[in-house]
Image (tube, coloured by chain):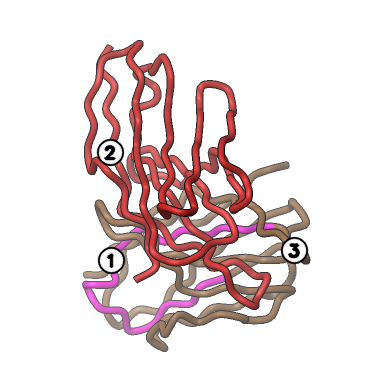
Chain colours: A brown, B red
Amino acid sequence: DTEVTQTPKHLVMGMTNKKSLKCEQHMGHRAMYWYKQKAKKPPELMFVYSYEKLSINESVPSRFSPECPNSSLLNLHLHALQPEDSALYLCASSQEGLAEFYEQYFGPGTRLTVT
Amino acid sequence: SQQGEEDPQALSIQEGENATMNCSYKTSINNLQWYRQNSGRGLVHLILIRSNEREKHSGRLRVTLDTSKKSSSLLITASRAADTASYFCATDPQRGSTLGRLYFGRGTQLTVWP
């Protein structure tokens, strides 16, 4: 199984709502990532989990809260978002190696609209 | 910024023609990767070339890397309409950490007309 799944595919939420994005992989990967991608722009790294521990937070506002309950799951909790947070949120995973970096496998993304 | 910069931003060709996309970057890297993204979908990894490699092939794809010029190119031969997508280069900068931060370039939008 070389698939990364993300739910939901689409999400519309108000600025006072709390919602969560979910990501799952069963490839035994120990690194998982959240990216944000605005239209016609490249993906921008938000968070990296390594062995279920948060290892990189790219200065993301606290209204985005990541969680890694186990090695296969990655969540992104959303609260009090702004309309400018509307974007495609991509999850990815990769192996970790001592000396090499492996390719990342991406999910299809969640299209988030904040109203 | 350590992001790669793709050139051209948009490329439009006929089926059967070759498509060449270029990527330049700023810092020393461990490797450079090329990804493809169909409209509004997830990215698909195409090829990874390490800093000590100069050329790599995968099917109809050919990637070159010139670390002295900090540049890479992606060649798609005998293009097909199904190759229509955005293509991104992504660099893994040389750092102490083995966990890669990938920096994506702005991408090239390739359109292949039947």
> In the rendering, at what x and y percent does residue B79 appear?
38, 18
Given the image, on which type of amino acid does mark 2 rest?
Gln
Q: Where is A84 relative to A53, above or below? A: above
Distance (Cα) linking label 2 and label 1: 22 Å
Specify the segment rendered in magenta. A75-94
Parent chain of label 1:
A
Residue B94: quarter of image: bottom right
* Disc 1 target residue: A86
Q: Position of residue B91 (x, y in %)?
A: 49, 58
Q: Count the marks.
A: 3
Lower sequence index among marks 1 and 3: 1
Marking on residue A99: 3
Chain assignment, label 2: B
Of helix, strand and loop, which one carries label 2?
Answer: strand
Identify whether A18 is placed above or below B98: below
Q: Nearer the viewer, residue A94 or A7?
A: A94
Q: Residues within 10 Å of mark 3 (few under 14, many from 20)?
A: few
Kind of element beneath mark 1: loop
Q: Is residue A64 above or below residue B110?
A: below
Q: Quadrant of residue A18?
A: bottom left
Percent coordinates x, y for residue B65 in the rendering? 50, 44
Name the spot of residue A59 as percent of width and height, x first: 42, 85
Residue sitting at x 31%, y 48%? B6
Mark seen at residue B109: 2
The label nearer to you, 2 versus 1, is 2
- In the image, taking residue A90 as reference, residue A11 lies left or right, namely left
Cβ atoms at labels 2 and 1 below 8 Å apart: no
